[in-house]
Amino acid sequence: MAKEKDDNYWRERLTAEEFRVCREAGTERPFTGEYWDTFEDGKYLCRCCQEVLFHSSSKFDAGCGWPSFDAEASAGVVEERADHSLGMRRVEILCANCGSHLGHVFPDGPTDTGLRYCVNSLSVKLDPDTEPQDD
């Protein structure tokens, strides 16, 4: 299982900045990540283990400077954990397969789910759809 990999394994496969975010629960600055303003069709995979975490159809512009989604790709692919760092009460989100830090989820989303999965671009990788979309 991917959660059993040690830091040396991940350091060999990730850049220093990806490691800081994914394995040490870091955060990239808002409006700087690769995907904060990307709306290309495709799937967002875990940067570490390539698990499908989100679909572009659930992505929306939350105005926060990070990629935001209103639902996970399928039930159970995103794990939640209480986060009391920085003097705040938040809910951290992680890849359920490998434990990679993704960001946080907030109950203020604009759709029926009411959720806003706020994700670091460094935690995910877009796998673009190669099939043309019907309009």
Image (cartoon, helix red, strand yellow):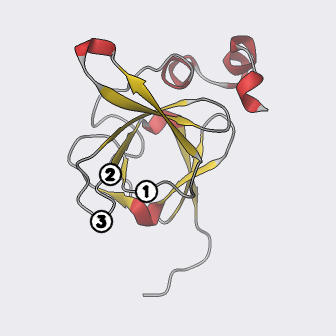
Question: In front: 33, or 108?
Answer: 108
Q: Which mark is residue 71?
A: 1
Q: Which mark is residue 115?
A: 2
Residue occupying the far right of the picture: 1
Residue occupying image coordinates x 79% and y 32%: 1
Q: Is residue 131 above or below residue 120?
A: below
**Labels 2 & 1 near each other (Cβ < 8 A):** yes
Q: Which mark is residue 31?
A: none
> Disc 2 on helix, strand or loop?
loop
Q: Disc 2 to disc 1, how far (Cα)?
A: 7 Å
> Disc 3 on helix, strand or loop?
loop
Q: Position of residue 15 (x, y in %)?
A: 59, 22
Q: Position of residue 104 (x, y in %)?
A: 37, 35
Q: Residues within 10 Å of mark 1 (few under 14, many from 20)?
A: many
Quarter of the image holding residue 14? top right
**Labels 3 & 2 near each other (Cβ < 8 A):** no
Q: Position of residue 74 (x, y in %)?
A: 57, 58
Question: In front: 61, or 90?
Answer: 90
Q: Is residue 135 above or below residue 43?
A: below
Q: Is residue 12 above or below residue 103?
A: above
Q: Mark 1 belongs to which amino acid?
A: Ala
Q: Residues within 10 Å of mark 3 (few under 14, many from 20)?
A: few
Q: Mark 3 belongs to which amino acid?
A: Asp
Task: Give the residue at mark 3.
Answer: 112
Residue occupying image coordinates x 32% and y 51%: 115
> Disc 1 on helix, strand or loop?
loop
Question: In front: 93, or 50?
Answer: 93
Residue occupying image coordinates x 44% and y 38%: 121
> Which tag, 2 or 1, sits closer to the chain's start?
1
Q: Disc 3 to disc 2, how far (Cα)?
A: 8 Å
